Image: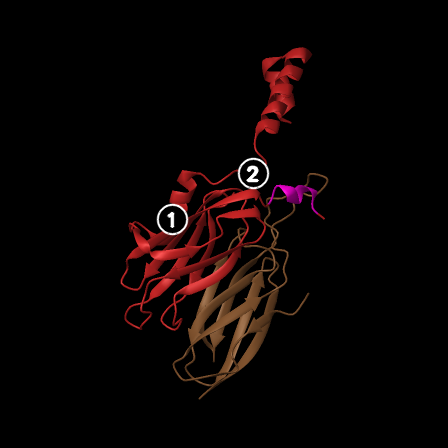
Amino acid sequence: MAEPRVRVPSTAKQGEIIEIKTLLSHPMETGHSRDVYGKLIPRYIIHTFTCTYNGEEVFRADWHPAIAANPYLAFYTVATESGRLRFEWIDDKDTVYATEAEITVV
Amino acid sequence: MKCTLIWQTARLSRRTLLQRLGAAGMLVVLRPAGAWATKETVQQAIRQLIGAREPQPGGVTLRLPKIAETGNSVPLTITADSPMTPEDHVLRIHVFVEGNPEPVAATYHLGRRAGKAEISTRLRLARSQTVLALAEMSDGSVRSGTASIVVTLGACVEEVWGN
């Protein structure tokens, strides 16, 4: 499984609104499509995405099968202090995909 | 098991039994592959997420292409009008896809640290439809916005023959 990719500015001014872009490789099987034998392919999606900023949750997403494969997500947060942003994706098999990014706030 | 039961209780002739089984088979064939979202299921999903509150149209903008060749990955950006201060901000944005088998696409939890009430995502759309977004504000009100899209080739369907 490919590593999740995130784009976070490495430095920001205190109070600045920063854009965060994330991407994860995942089939996001809807549970509604069938294979060549007509058998239903079981649902296999990322159902939860969270972003924590120095341990505090700043953004979360609950996903359903209508989210495209290889889910892309862009959102914003306020640069409050230097530290670490942690990103976690959880799928139907309880696999957790995680990555972190450092930010310096001046 | 069911068939033996019918056989015993009604003492059907083989011919009628076969006819009935055939009819039952037809029913199965005629049913669509998956149940689609209906006006009712969309309403139910809305009520589950925002309760009895009535969404006020406006204040939520959806950027969605007018036409998509396939519904597999359709970019969507949602912006809600909000100063995003600790006192007045967007708590959650819900996305509904009435033309898909399941009415809810996603819920995004923003809150007071989001800074800007905007998210970008990519949807999988089964057919042409109107996408609805509801924004739950910190004062308890709910705003709504919609965007319609024509999907030439829906997602899900062609995946039957997919890799």
Residue A97 or residue B144, whichever sits in front: B144
Foreground residue among A6 and A1: A6
Q: Quadrant of residue B92?
A: bottom left
| Side of B12 where B138 appears, left or right | left
Of helix, strand and loop, which one carries label 1?
Answer: helix
Residue receiving disc 1: B46
Q: Which mark is residue B34?
A: 2
Nearest to the observer: residue B19 or residue A104: A104
Amino acid type shown at disc 2: Gly
Query: Magenta includes B80?
Result: no
Residue A79 position (above or below residue B162)? below
Q: Tell me which residue sits at (29%, 68%) in the image.
A: B88
Q: CB under 8 Å between callouts 2 and 1? A: no
Quadrant containing the N terminus of chain B in the rendered view = top right
Q: Which residues are magenta?
A: B156-162
Q: Is residue B14 left or right of residue B114?
A: right
Number of labels in the image equals 2
Q: Position of residue A19 (x, y in %)?
A: 47, 72
Coordinates of residue A45 in the picture (x, y in percent): 58, 56
Q: Is residue A40 visible?
A: no
At horizontal 42% and vertical 49% (from top left) the residue drawn is B147
Task: From the viewer's side, name the closer residue of B3 and B86.
Answer: B86
Image coordinates of residue A89 in percent, x first then y, are 56, 65
Q: Amino acid at mark 1?
A: Ile
Supply the letter of whichever chain is red: B
Chain A: what color? brown
Which residue occupies the extreme front position in the image? B66
Residue A2 appears in the rendering: yes
